[in-house]
Image (cartoon, helix red, strand yellow):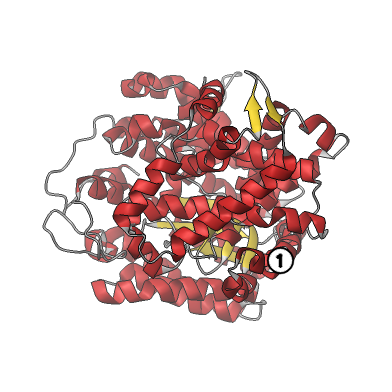
Amino acid sequence: MLKVFKKIMEKPITNRPRLRNIEDTLVLLESEEGPDGEKINWKDLYEKVGPWESGLELADKVREVVRGYLVSKFPEIKERIPSINALPDKEVLDALSNSWFEGLEEKVKGKRSEVLLSVLTHILRRIEKRIYTKIIENSSDDDLEKLGLSSNLRTLVTTTLEASVKSDPLYIRYLAYAQLSPKPPEDANPSAPIGQDGKPHTWAELFPHETQFISKKLKNLLKSKEKWQDVEGAGEFIKYIELLADYFSEKDVNKAREMKDEIEMAYADSITGGFPVIISPPTGSYYKEPYLDPELRVSLRTPESRAQEQNFIALQNVIADELGTLGVSQFADDMRQKPIASVVSIGAYGANLTFTAAAETEKDITLFLDEQIRRYDKNLKDFLPMIEISDNAFGDTPVERIEEMSREDTIFHELSHSIWTLDKEAQKRLGIKSETIIGEIAAETISRGLAKELIEKGKINYTQEQYIAVTIAIPLQVIKGRDPNNEYFKAAVYVLNGMFEQGLIEFSGTKIRVKKIDEIFDYLQDNAKKIIALYEDSEMNGEKANKWVKENTTAGKKLQELIDFIKK
C-alpha cells in the first residue's frame, strides 16, 4: 500500500507537490484494541457484517461496518494529520465514508488536502473491497442469488473488483496532475489531458503502472469466459470489456479520443443485454472539464434493483410520448430507446472517491439504487415538513412511496438530459463552463414542464399537491448539501427563484407557503420552454450563455433568506 502512495507524485508532473502526512494515512490499516482487549484487524471486518437478505441490505451493512471502523480511528487520524482538525468532523466523516466531498468543496477543492483526503478514502474503499470479496467468495448459492449472481460468476466479480480498485491510485495521481496542468483549450481531447509540457497525454502514457494493471486484469476476465459466456447478455459484456481494456492501455491520443464514444455505446449495449455485472466506464466525470476522470464502478443487477427498472421504463415512455407539449418531439425516439439499468453498487472507485453519483447518463441511464436511497430518498421526508401543503398532500402516504417519488425525480432528471444537453454542437456553442450549468438546469426543468399534463392524464402517480411539494423539497436538499458555485446548486436556484419572485410561494421564516398551485405548473412549463429556446437559439454563444447563467442563477432576496435558513 505504501508503495502506491510513494508513486502518486511521479512524472510527468515537473513541479511536484509535497504532501505531508501522506504516510500517516496508513493509521487506517493498523490493528487496534477492542473493548475487551481483543485485536481488531481491518482484514477481519467482513466477519462483522452479519446476515443479510438482499443486495441493498448488504450494501448498507458493509457501509455501516466501514464507517464504524473509521469513527474508531478518527481521533488518531486527527492527531496524526493536524490539518484535518480545521475541517468539520461530520463533513470529513461523510466525505471519507460515503465519498460525499460536497460539504468540503469550498475548503479543499484544488488544494493538497483534497489529495490527502482522497488517499484516506481510497484506503477505506480497499477495506470495503476486501469485505465484498470475502463475502462473495464465501456466499452460498442462495446468498449469491440474492445478489443476482450464480456460482459461475463468483470469480468474475472478485476479479472485477480487484481491477477496478486500481483506478483509485490512478485517480489520485491524476488529481495531482490536473491541479498543476494548464487550462484546457477549447478543442481539448477529453481522453488526453495536456500537461505542463504543453502536450496531450493519455492515461496509459502518464500512469503506466496503474493503467497496465487495470488493462491486464480486465483481459484476464475474458480468459475464463467459458464459465459464464452462456449467461444472458454475456456477448455484449465481453465486447465492452475488450474495449475498456484497450482504452486503459491506449497511448495514441487520437485513438483514445475515438474510443470514448465506442465505449459509451458498448456500455449501453451491455445494459440492454441484461448481464448481471455492471462496470461503469470512465466517461461521465470531469474534475477538469472536458478531461475525463479515471474511474470504474462495479455494480450488480440484484432482484430488487431489477424490479425498479420496469417502473423507470414506464416513466420513460410516458415522458417521451408527451414531449410534443414542449415542441421537442424530435427527441422522443432517442429518449424512449435509451437503456436504463437500476443497480446496487459494490465498488465505486477512481473519481468516485470524491463524488459518488446516484445516477449517470450518456447513451444510457444507470441509477445506483443504494446510493440514491442513501443520499436522497431517505432524506426527502426531512424536507417535506418545511412545505405547508405536505401534511395534507401526503397524509397516510407510505414512506416507501415518498422515497419512490425521490427516485422517480432522479429518473426524470436523467431523462431530461436527452433533450439538447448531450448535443455536442450545442455544448461547443454555449461553452463548456456555461453549458455544464445550463445542462443541469435543463435536466431539472424539462420534465417538470410536462408534469401537469402527465398528472391530469393519470400517466404518473401524483396528486398536484404532492408533485409541487416534491418539486420544492428536492431543490432544498441540493441547496443544503452543495456549494453555491456548484452547477446542481445553481439549477436548484433556477427552479425556486421565480416561484418566490412571482409570488407563487413565500417563506415565513420557518415554513414555505404554496399560494398558487395552478400558476406554479404554468411557471414550470414556461421555465422548460425558456431553456429549450436557449439551446435552439443559434445566436446564443459562450459570452451570452455566461451572462444568462449569471442573471438566472443568482438567488433573489426572498430565496436567499430561505437559503440562509437551510444552510445555518
Q: Position of residue 386 (x, y in %)?
A: 69, 27
Apparent side of residue 446 relative to residue 210 in the rendered image (left or right) = right
What count of labels does the image hold? 1
Q: Residue 440, image x and y in percent?
A: 49, 51
| Residue 481 visible to the viewer | yes
- In the image, 250 versus 491, the foreground residue is 491
105 or 319, which lies in front?
319
Give the residue at x 35% y 67%: 248
| Residue 109 x, y percent position in the rendering | 33, 37
| Quadrant position of the N terminus in the picture | top left
Q: Is residue 133 visible?
A: no
- Judge from the rendering whether residue 159 lies leftward or rightward of residue 209; answer left or right: right
Label 1 crowd bin: few (<14), some (14–19), many (20+), radius 10 Å: some
Left or right: residue 510 compared with residue 362: right
**Amino acid of disc 1:** Ile
Between 377 and 545, the residue placed more toward the observer is 545
Q: The residue tagged with tag 1: helix, strand or loop? A: helix
Q: Where 287 falls versus 513 (above or below)?
A: below
Residue at horizontal 44%, vertical 37%?
101
Q: Is residue 524 above or below residue 217?
A: above
Residue, x 29% and y 51% (percent of image)? 174
The residue carrying mark 1 is 313
Give whichever of 559, 351 is nearer the camera. 559
Extreme residue in the right direction: 396
